[in-house]
Image: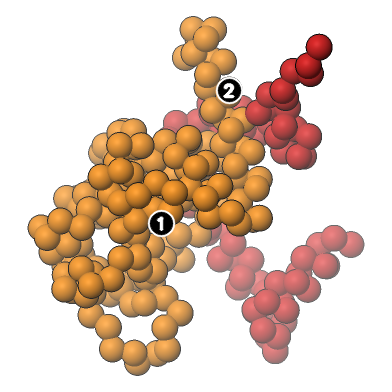
Chain colours: A orange, B red
Amino acid sequence: MTQVEKLLKILTRERIEFVVIGGLAANIHGVTIPTYDVDICYNRADENLQRLSLLLKRIHATLRGAPPGLPFQPDAVTLKAGLNFTFSTDLGDLDILGEVGGIGFYADVKKCAQEVAMLGAKVFVLDISAIVKAKKFAGRRKDEEMILQLEALQEMEQRKEQHGDS
Amino acid sequence: MSEQPKSAIERAKEYGIDVTLLESSLRLTVDQRIRRLQDWIIFQEEIKKVRKQLYPDQSEHDASRKVAEDSDT
């Protein structure tokens, strides 16, 4: 079972540079469609890869869906050699993306993120427009409702701001 | 005269989305939204356990479909 709160807290505590993306970011903005994993876009700078690999080892990250026994070590070299990974961990499913389709790499993703105070920390979360852009880029039918919810939420927030009662 | 484009809220309503749920969601804090999601995940885990008890011989997918069919009736 994915322990969303614990995963976010441990990522923050270990000073991993990341942006929350995907369904979790959408839920943070108010979408009511549940998600079952934590999706992040991570900084691929060497120091961050080192910190991330240490954390992944600690939470016993394995490649989700890979045949049992497939040798895999989430060390910094492996992370550097790959880009996007889907893991099962002691704290549940964690997807780490080096690139978000339709947005770009970490630096581009961070430009489209807002710093949100949550769970006693400050976490970068992809903004609504960028989530919509990424979802439209992915072109999956299952995202149709999420896109409509996000656009409606954005409009509600804009109306609130216009009426000055935020 | 050209027709006004529909607002995002109107489009969501036409799709069948209950926008009152979105309004309620906006009234929650971010921490509350994360906890609501966590509660949902816990609830789904419980459902999974029930499915396994009810349909031990079926694959997860089949058992899941059966529970859904049963709950429709």
| Chain of the residue displaying label 1 | A
Quarter occupied by residue B11: top right
Task: Residue lying at the far right in this picture: please name it.
Answer: B73
Tell me the residue that label 1 is attached to: A38
Within 10 Å of the Cα at label 2, are there few (<14), some (14-19), or many (20+) other Cα atoms? Answer: some
Q: Which mark is residue A156?
A: 2
Does A156 sit above or below residue A115?
A: above
Relative to residue A142, is residue A91 depicted above or below?
Answer: below
Residue A48 placement: quadrant = bottom left
Q: Amino acid at mark 2?
A: Met
> Is A100 located above or below residue A80 in the figure?
above
Mark 1 and mark 2: span between their CA atoms?
A: 26 Å
A8 lies left or right of B64:
left
Label 2 element class: helix
Instruction: Identify the residue shown where x is 34% and y is 37%.
Output: A113
| Earlier-in-chain disc, 1 versus 2 | 1
Q: Report whether residue B14 is seen.
A: yes
**Residue B13 against residue B63 in the figure, above or below:** above
Name the spot of residue A105 as percent of width and height, x first: 30, 51
Amino acid type, label 1: Val
A93 or A161: which is nearer to us? A161
In the shown orientation, is residue B1 left or right of residue B21?
right
Position of residue A58 measured from the top left corner of the image (x, y, whole percent): 21, 70
Q: SS of the residue at dot 1?
A: strand
Tell which subunit mark 2 falls on. Answer: A
Name which residue lies at 50% across and 42% down: A133
- Residue for point 23% across, 72% down: A81
Q: Position of residue A20 (x, y in %)?
A: 36, 47
Residue at far top of view: A164
